[in-house]
Amino acid sequence: MHTIEPYWKWRDYYRAEADEKSPFYGRVYSEFEYIDTIYNYYIHPQWDFFGSETLYLKLLYVNYNKHVAIIEFIGEWNDCRANDIEFLKRDIIDGLIENGIYKFVLIGENVLEFFSDCADYYEEWYDDIKEQNGWIIALHFREHIIAEMQQATIHHYIQINEKFSAINWRQYKPLHLIAYLEAHQDKLLS
């Protein structure tokens, strides 16, 4: 797992450690010192800890004028044991919403497992953004995780399905990805 680095080709567009509104503002990253682990497996030092012992993230892109954030994840998303969604909602999402973000893209190709508890925090997140016509889209989550999320009724709040997992998001610049998702939402959801 230590070789899986967050997507870095958008660093010319956004860096969370340089964003005064980011929860990771001022953070200094090491390329060589591996200290964070998920189940005793070291992870790349560019991933950000947000309270969960099994799930880490990277704010790949935030644009306050366009009201959008793109977040990549790695690890095990465990709401049942660790209540990861509470940490995510309280420590990351609430701050982004307070700063005008109401469109979220979650990238989950490095999320290996998902364990649900209840959908309360997902519903709260959706309720916080729906008046602004906000949305949450999950890209590149694995098939078994999509099934688990749908079984837990999270798909009522997060747009998640196999069509979103098929999008080659790396071929886009951040704003082009957002424009593509907005233009194709109805088609992708049908």
Image (cartoon, rainbow, N blue to C red):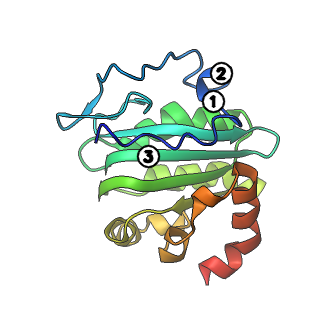
Q: Secondary structure at mark 3?
A: strand
Q: Secondary structure at mark 2?
A: helix
How crowded is the residue under tag 2: few (<14 C-alpha within 10 Å), some, or many (20+)? few
Which is closer to the viewer, label 3 or label 1?
1
Pick out the residue farthest to the left.
40
Residue 124 appears at what percent x and percent y?
Answer: 54, 50
Residue at 58%, 56% (x, y): give it: 170
Disc with the residue nearer the chain's start (3 vs 1): 1
Residue 75 appears at what percent x and percent y?
Answer: 32, 46
Q: Determine which residue is flagged by label 2.
A: 18
Using the rendered view, name the quadrant where residue 71 is placed: top right
Q: Are marks 1 and 2 in contact (CB under 8 Å)?
A: yes
89 or 56: nearer the viewer: 56
102 or 111: nearer the viewer: 111
Question: In this rendering, is residue 10 above or below 144?
Answer: above
Question: In this rendering, is residue 107 above or below 46?
Answer: below
Question: In this rendering, is residue 38 above or below 169?
Answer: above
Amino acid carrying mark 3 in the image: Phe
Amino acid carrying mark 2 in the image: Ala
Disc with the residue nearer the chain's start (2 vs 3): 2
Residue 102 appears at what percent x and percent y?
Answer: 69, 48
56 or 15: nearer the viewer: 15
Q: Determine which residue is flagged by label 1.
A: 15
How crowded is the residue under tag 3: few (<14 C-alpha within 10 Å), some, or many (20+)? many
Residue 135 appears at what percent x and percent y?
Answer: 65, 58
Residue 180 visible within the image: yes
Figure quadrant of the N terminus: top left
Using the rendered view, name the quadrant where residue 142 is placed: bottom left
Q: Determine which residue is flagged by label 3.
A: 73
Residue at 58%, 15% (x, y): give it: 26
